Image: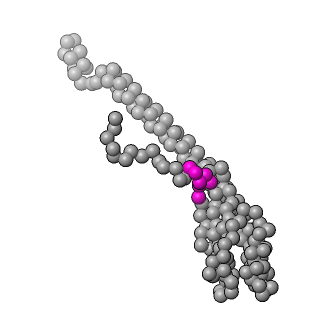
Amino acid sequence: MSNKSKGISGRGLGVGYVTLIMLFAVICLTVLSVLSYQAARANEKLNEKSSVFCTEYYAADGRAKMILSELDNDALEAHSSGFFAESFAELCNEYENISVRQVPEGFSVSFSEPLNERLKLSVNVVFYNTPVESRYSINEWKTISADTEASDAPLGVWDGSPLG
């Protein structure tokens, strides 16, 4: 009987080792599932923010294109009148939040459309005195910060001077 008990205890692992390995596997799988869930939630939030930004951008882009279309019609009307400089400047004064300045090629027109509370779409277009191939060219069409004071403020970056 003593041989029998020696053979059983020497051949196999005890129940305690198997339980510890199973507990370790369960803990590892639980941690991995929690991390996977958090990554999926972060990805979902990023997709929602991206969708909102795209909607805001294309809405502002559409409004800016409508203004550009109206300005192009005004340029066409000014060209047909024969007095482009006077007619175009007069027609541009009817718009709000549009700055017009005369340049050698014609007129530089700048305006912006708000995207959201932090960004706006800035547009700069030059309308030509004499239409060569087209009546205008777009010099700038980009998003910029809506708060110009915040974008000009210096950042609190360490300049390398000794601390203290």
Q: Is residue 10 left or right of residue 130?
A: left
Reply above or below: 80 against 98: below
Q: What residue is drawn where x is 42% and y is 46%?
A: 157
Residue 86 position in % (x across, y down): 76, 79
Q: What residue is drawn where x is 22% and y is 21%?
A: 10
Reply above or below: 145 against 161: below
Is 115 one of the magenta-colored residues?
no
Foreground of the two, 128 or 40? 128
Q: What residue is drawn where x is 38% and y is 45%?
A: 158
Residue 12 position in % (x across, y down): 27, 24
Q: Residue furthest top?
A: 1
Q: Is residue 153 left or right of residue 18?
A: right
Is 147 one of the magenta-colored residues?
yes
Q: Is residue 2 left or right of residue 55?
A: left
Residue 54 position in % (x across, y down): 64, 57
The boundaries of the magenta stretch are 144-150
- In which quarter of the view is residue 75 placed? bottom right
Q: Quadrant of the C terminus?
A: top left
Q: What residue is drawn where x is 52% and y is 39%?
A: 37
Q: Is there any visible trace of residue 4 in the rendered image?
A: no
Foreground of the two, 76 or 86? 86
- In which quarter of the view is residue 8 placed? top left
